[in-house]
Amino acid sequence: MLVALLASLLSFSPAPLLPSAGAIAQGAADLELHLEDARTGQPVSGAIVRLREQDRSAISDEAGRVRMTDLETGTLRVTVEAAGYTTLETSLGLGAEGLRQTLRLEPRPVELEAVRATGTPLRGSRPYQPGQALDREELVRRASTSLGEMLDGEPGVAMRSFGPVTGRPVIRGLDGDRVAVLENGRRMGDMSETAPDHAVTMDPLGTARVEVVRGPASLLYGSSALGGVVNLLLDDLPRSWAQGSRAGVAIQGATANRQEAVSASGIHGDARWALTARGALRTSDDVRTPGTDSGVLEETWNRTRSAGVGGVVRSESLVGGLAVDLDLRSFGIPEELDDPDERVELRTSRQRVTGELDWEPRRAFDVVEFRASAIRFDQQEVEIDGLLGPVQEEEVEHDFHRRTLDMAVTAIHGPLGPISAGALGLSFLGQSLEVSGEDEFHPDGTLDALGLFSFQELPLGDGVSVQFGIRGEVSRTRARPNVFFPDLRDSRTEGTLSASLGARVEVGPRLELGAQLARAHRAPRLEELWSDGPHLGAARYEVGTPGLRNEIGHGADLFALLGGDRLRGELALFANRIDDFVVASPTGETDAESGLPVVVWEATPALLRGGEARLELEPVPGLVLQVTGDMVRGDRRGSEGGPLPYMPPNRLGAALRYDAGSVRVGVRGRLAAPQDRVHREDPTDGYALLDLELGFRPSEGQLLSLRLDNALDRVYRDHLSRVEDRRFPMPGRNLSMIWRWTPGA
């Protein structure tokens, strides 16, 4: 059905939705710009074009085109900003007859500059630690069931999973709430960080951009950023927009799990305001694999619905807006139960209100940014009995109700003495959690955290610059009684200090060296402190330790970035020494009532070290050979010694792709080494996978991508899978088709 639908749509060329030239006011003129990559000639989408004297701005579409109507004639001072390109400033003469002009943007020689919204609060500044960014087109090509699967294979980024739906990024061997997964810089409010059977609440086809920061980031984001940050950027509240209407739709299908998905979005803008809307549906069945007798991984299905609306207004010095979104999903968990007539299902609901405001006072501060989100999140873990009979009975094993309030104010200033730019910020995070159900294993609780930070940049001349920052945070965690813990009342209040010092040296026009030292922290979670009961989804009986202290990490990063037309690369080395690293240690005992293995949350000193590399060679325009690799070694320090649990294996990757503009072809190989450095978990064998890609741009605004994952249908097991004994193999051969259409492009 999807193939037939696409065949009819691909032959359709829509009329633009933007205002026509005939609707021009007398005495005004139109401007149409086409933005191209100066090296490849490909269109540059998502670029912001500003005409400051006329207080107008617009964003280039997927054809690289920008239209502005009703402009005053004369000389226009044009500024063009696009991620991955050098900012272009030029002057154009606009006459009464209008103007069509092609502008060519020079790619930046240093890829790290693309990570701008996440690694630093300073606009126009580059972060001082390794990272990567994926734009909308790349995300469409990678669209999958989970965020973890989309990012898996990036240098330094692996995936923790409990079946395909719950894949979550692992950065340098750290996962859970040691990696902050954000949306537009704010907490997502779900519970994906607390257990491997919980999913990240996101729409893979509706995300405009993803930025990843590898390494400690507590300075900006407080606790839960000890290992890094993954920031999902949405277009619900755009900072700039074109006048008129734009819409887009994306369709996805996959064979391994019979997945069907559709996502649609739209924006209507005027000179001073804009309205946005988006929605998505996704369904998939159990994943097929060659590694089981039945040929499927049972209870890996998924059903998702999401929608959101937003509104933005702007004036001479203000841009602000409000957005509301809803996400509903249910999915299966591949848990082995004693009774084959039972299964486990998770059901989640998230409602969120987000507000943003940017104010340019043009006095003491260049910009003051306010961000806030209020989230209501509910999750049920349901055990269903009677699958083989005429009547089914449901029992809610765990029922979670989390409420989150996340706010931050950041004031960005310009030159101040020797300092070129800086920022002062204040943040607040408040969360409450109520739990119930037949097998609840920890009390209710609340968290309140208040943080104050300063971030400054100091140029030293001759291509050398330094960034330094400090953050103080006070947090209070309280345990509250519930049905299963009626007498438990406890609280802890702690203050923590985070800091960073980074340096960047431009050795030449194509080589940059950098280093950063950082102190970061993580506060123990509620269940790590006070749990005592069976966690059905995680297949273990958990026992907390109230005396756990905050994890304190001291990290060091060294990186080199090579940029050029034909040769580009990145090399990063890191070490992260963490005191009071919290792990779930198996005791070797089994709980008599539940039959689950008993684990105790305990602290140990830890050391993680390793590196990542990426090298790209482009002998002719459009033909790129890429080689990547990463490794991480995690050890317990002190007398206990031994490896940390769930460390990803060493990995190598190689890819060859050719992009001719209208056609793109690629092949990729992935190699994972065996992982036998384990802590009370089963070792895993190495594996090699082959992936193929074919993409088309049949007309302006359309993109069709075909991807064949695990083309040789290999049977393999991922070491970071949290399914008990890893008895379920990973998905087999999968053909995925993604089509995106943006009318008016």
Image (tube, grey):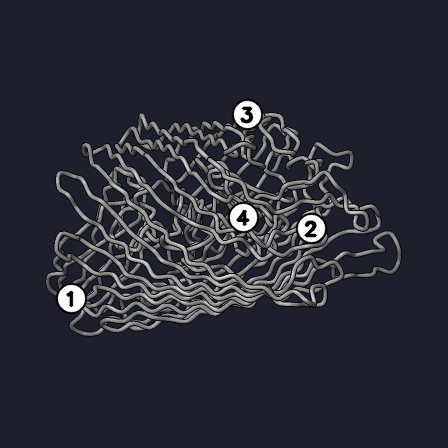
Q: Which residue is mark 4?
A: 176
- Distance in Å between CA atoms under marks 2 and 4: 15 Å
The amino acid type found where label 2 is placed reads: Gly
Cα–Cα gap, marks 1 and 3: 58 Å
Seen at 54% across and 30% down, the residue is: 649
As drawn, 153 above or below 602: above
- Percent position (x, y) of residue 667? 48, 29
Which residue carries the number 1 mark? Answer: 53
Query: From mark 2 to mark 3, how far is it between C-alphas?
Result: 29 Å
Measure the C-alpha gap from mark 3 to mark 4. Answer: 23 Å
Residue 651 pos. (x, y %): 50, 28
Horizontal arrangement in the rendering, residue 730 relative to residue 552 (left or right): right
- Which quadrant of the view contains residue 363? bottom left
Kindly state the secondary structure of the residue where label 1 is placed. Answer: helix
Label located before the other in sequence (2 or 4):
4
Mark earlier in primary sequence (1, 3): 1
Q: Are marks 2 and 3 in contact (CB under 8 Å)?
A: no
Q: Nearer the viewer, mark 1 or mark 3?
A: 3
Q: Is residue 390 visible?
A: yes
**Residue linked to disc 3:** 673
